[in-house]
Image (tube, grey):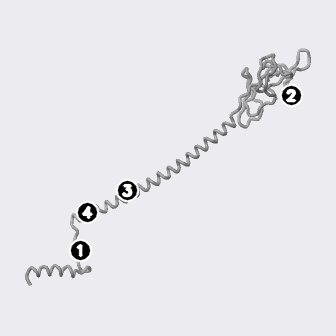
Amino acid sequence: MTDENNKDERRRGSMRFQDSETTTPREPTLAEKRARLKAEEESRRRAEEEEKALQEAEEKSRSRRKMLAGGGVTVGLVGLVAAWYAVASPEEVFAVCTRADGTVVDDDYCDDDYVNSHHGYHSGGWIFLPSPGGGYEQYRYNYGGSGTVGQRVNGGTYTRPANASISTKSGTTVQRGGFGISGGSFGKGGGS
């Protein structure tokens, strides 16, 4: 055998017969160490990015659900408030003071202060004021009717509307209406 063949035989032989238990691994080169660290760092960075993207997606989904739920609550609340407002908004009604025969008279005849100062009284929806010739004259409010002093009232009703804001043409408040108000008298004015 030639010298060259002996070298090849030794190389092959040394490779074939390495024992993993007795052979000590060689120290990695600087380039291998750097490549391994770079690969580990790249793998860690990719895992962190994936985790961050997953958290952002979950947060976005959670936020979207909250926004949709909040939007539903807002729409429902707006609808509820609108419905309550429609029910609670008092109707505006004007009242005119009339005699028992339906003739429109000055608003003073139905005003509480005027009635009290002239020794009158209220009874059964009527206002009674002493008459100059003796006895009493009867007055009451007509709600929703119209007419001028001295004329007969045109339209309206003598039943006080519940849930209505009632005032006279002269600006006297007979009743402040609103949700839950059921015909009680507030402010000046008498009536039924």
Q: CA distance from mark 2 to mark 1?
A: 117 Å
| Lower position in the chain sequence, tag 2 or tag 4 | 4
Residue 52 in percent (x, y) is at 40, 55
**Circle 2: is it few (<14), some (14-19), or many (20+) Cα within 10 Å?**
few
| Lower position in the chain sequence, tag 4 or tag 3 | 4
Q: Which mark is residue 74?
A: none
Residue type at tag 2: Ser
Secondary structure at numbered mark 4: helix
Q: CA distance from mark 4 to mark 3?
A: 21 Å
Quarter occupied by residue 133: top right
Q: CA distance from mark 2 to mark 3?
A: 85 Å
Residue designated by label 1: 25
Residue 168 in percent (x, y) is at 74, 23
* Nearer to us: label 3 or label 1: 3
Q: Is residue 51 above or below residue 69?
A: below
Q: CA distance from mark 2 to mark 4?
A: 105 Å
Q: Name the quarter where the N terminus is drawn.
A: bottom left
Q: Residue furthest top?
A: 133
Q: Which mark is residue 49?
A: 3
Q: Which mark is residue 35?
A: 4
Q: CA distance from mark 1 to mark 4?
A: 18 Å
| Lower position in the chain sequence, tag 2 or tag 3 | 3
Q: Residue at x 27, y 64 (%)?
A: 36
| Lower position in the chain sequence, tag 2 or tag 1 | 1
Q: Residue furthest front?
A: 155
